[in-house]
Image (spheres, grey):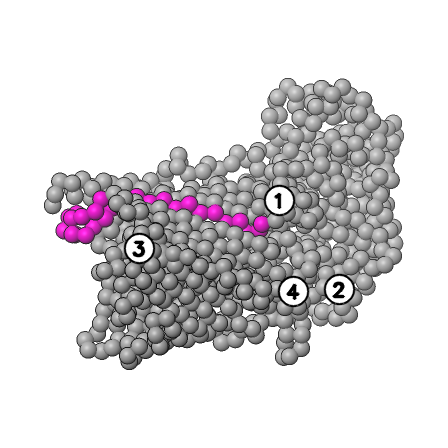
Amino acid sequence: MKLTLQAFAFTILLLCSRGAFAQIDSTLLNTPAKTDTSKHNLNMDAIYNRPFLKLGKSPVSIGGYVESDVLYTNTSGITNGSQFQFRRFSLFVASTISKHVKFLSEIEYENDPTGDPGESAGGTFGIEYAALDIEFNPLLNLRSGLILNPIGSFNQNHDGPKYEFTDRPIAMTQMLPDTWSNTGFGLYGKHYTNHWMFGYEFYVTGGFDDAIIDNSQAKTFLPAANASTSRLTSSASGEPLYTGKLSFGNDQIGQLGLSYMGGVYNTWRIEGAQVDDKRSVNIFDVDFNTTIPKLHTAITTEWAWVFVDLPADYTPEYSHRQYGGYIDVVQPIIHGHILDWDNATVNLAVRGEYVDWNEGNFAATGQRMYNDVWSIMPAISFRPTPLTVLRLNYRIEHSRDITGNTIGAAIGPTRGLSFGVSTYF
Amino acid sequence: MSKKSTILISLFTSLVVVTIASFSSCSKIFPQMINPEDGLCGPVDLSNSQTILFSQGNDQFFANRSSATGLGPYFVATGCGSCHSSDNRGHPFTILTRFGQTDSTGNKFLAEGGPQLGTFALPGYTPEQIPAGATSSKFIAPITAGVGFLEVVPDSAILAMAAANVNNPDGVRGHPNYSTIPSYVTPLPGSMPRADGKYICRFGRKASTYNLVQQVAQAYNHDMGITSTYLPINPYNYMDQTPPPPSSTPEVSNDDFNSVVFYVTCLQTPIQRNPTDATVLQGNALFVKIGCETCHKQTLTTGYSPVASLAYQTINPFTDLLVHDMGPGLDDGYTEGNAKTSEWRTAPLWGLGLAPGVQGGSYYLMHDGRAHSIQQAIQLHGGEAAVSAARFSQFSSSDQAAVITFLKSL
């Protein structure tokens, strides 16, 4: 079954694009990538497609970004008032070690109560990424170390200053793990001809653990694996997590990514003795982004489907299937000289998102299981430069518990106002 | 700076300032608190310190447990809120199964996992099976709201209600369920134990649980597989032949345990909706006329409670806290305490109309959720309630509708 799904995943991966970052002008960035393909960007390039400062003649470059905001939310009339949040501080350190050999790391402080609860409870410092890249050929690069698994686009391309929203997409941070990185290695490469571009990535890494079906959320919750303090040095299942992605881009059409991540997640043997059946998790993801010519309207969307093997007769609070995603539409309405900034932009934007945490029906009643959430979030943002964003969001959200109930703790209608600042430095 | 830039910056700044200024006061753009009668939320009147404890209990009540926080290895639900959404009734997906007892001599299957089945098990474990020869019954979780008031209804009042039924012409009798209380339970002031040392119990489908401390301890242990100071041994699957040792450290702390007891104790009672509506009033009168109110007592008065808001209050729970013979149709062959297998505690009807809101839009009534409408639930009443149920069936459709409207208003 596992091999079949993996074969299926890699077989279906295929199509088109051109990186379309309406919110950030990549020409302003001092990208260390020196190959010809750096002229064309895919989401896979986001890790290096950031502003860096070089330190004199040193081969080391540094950069980073910061995010903070003030947030007021109200669910079914219940609020804890205004919350002032310092969400993230990330520091990038990159080094060109020698010709075709480079290293990049990202160290992050994160405290995002609206994001991945498995990762950020109380705020954490951690290494999010630290990998060595060796380029044999633009089509054949080896990457090893602590790697961001290329599942979808948001996991690869999530820096706060790139977005007009203070919150990260629910599906991409709570259904899929937020900034999901693991120890491992793999290959990637890309190729372009005229307006077309192709990229691939394939990695084997450590993976998930039993916490994804045994956690404080009482729902299948992949981010729960982030809580393990040992996952970067030991794999719960003792088997690799496979992640693969194919990206296709066209300058005029956009960029499409098809990705898969899966493998055995549970601890099925202890000291060589089998204690459980092997159970796997399989995730399929489609992402697309484009910028409509002339209007300069940027559209970014990603949807993912999660399939998890559960123990027989397990509580229905944990699900076999989940799906969800988001779509961002960003429309620049004014661009040009504002105050003393020459390249300033005012954007109107909206994000729509949906997550079904528990797709299926109750065995006991045949009724649909709900446990879902949808949200629409209009926004207005001001970018004095492409690297800095001030953003104002209003969230309209509605959630239901597993039986469809909308009255109770942390369910029902939610409205939220947030104002935040994020910038590269 | 150009005029356009000035206007834009002014507009953006104004938006930000207005937004921040309105964070705490702009009621129109934020959801309003639901009307208390439309949902079950909030405590009775409490002091500040009591509110803090209630809030702590609320967090614990709705916390989801995992193996890391003591869940399992055998369980029915992962948290109190799984069974008691919005402090109300449960849904069939968290229905629990009891087995092993057929009379007042006790449960004969305690050594084989009784009295409660571990429906689910953590990964690597196998859920329990009902042992051969054991009878069983399924219980859907009852409403939680208002239980603190029921706890302090005096024993004398319960005995008086039983005594009043002695000559009931419809055959209604009913009696308290006397059970042995566990050593960790302290009898409440005014309790009236029998000469054999058994106490009047009042919680659970069979009224076999004495008070909310016992109820919470059993719920943690039997429903979630969480040990406490009071019940320090996890349930186990006897078929696995690996009984667990007593926990050296309770999986729920005493502070958290006590806060949950305080939380459920202080939950406000459900509030009737449209109590002055003509059809509701008509239905209420018919409800009394056909004898439903003989068991589903509309009005009770509480006794002493250390929480002033609970003490000496008049409440409308629609129960007499007695167990009644409900006939062979509801006899599952399983019981608890000194109740017979066909005897069930009169279910409180308060909050009945709110049930669909927590049961996925449907009704799952009676002890195991077998009734999918109020009308069906009435028709399932047999035994001591058969006469009243027959009278309801003889009503015109408009009178039946009035009774249903009344019950939905509760």
- For disc 1, the chain is A
One can see residue B290 in this view: yes
Query: From the viewer's perspective, is the residue at label 3 or at label 2 nearer?
Result: 3
At label 3, which amino acid type do we have?
Asp
Q: Circles 4 and 2: CB distance less than 8 Å?
A: no
User: From the viewer's perspective, is the residue at label 1 or at label 3 nearer?
Assistant: 3
> Percent from the top left, x then y, of residue B14?
24, 41
Q: Residue at x 74, y 26 (%)?
A: B287
Up/down of B403 relative to A131, above or below:
above
The answer to whether residue B89 is left or right of residue A29 is: right
What x and y, as percent, mark residue B336? 81, 50
* A2 lies left or right of A301: right
Q: Are marks 1 and 2 on the same chain?
A: no
Query: Magenta segment, principal secondary structure?
Result: strand
Q: Which residue is mark 2?
A: B237
Q: Residue at x 75, y 64 (%)?
A: B237
Q: Name the residue furthest left.
A: B1
Res. B397 image quadrant? top right
Check if mark 1's residue and mark 3's residue have beta carbons within 8 Å. no
Residue A368, numbered circle: 1
Crowding at mark 3 (Cα within 10 Å: few <14, some 14-19, many 20+): some
Q: Which residues are magenta?
A: A334-359
The answer to whether the residue labelled 4 contacts the one labelled 3, judged by CB atoms less than 8 Å apart, is no
Give the residue number, with chain letter if any, for mark 4. B123
Tag nearer the camera, 4 or 2: 4
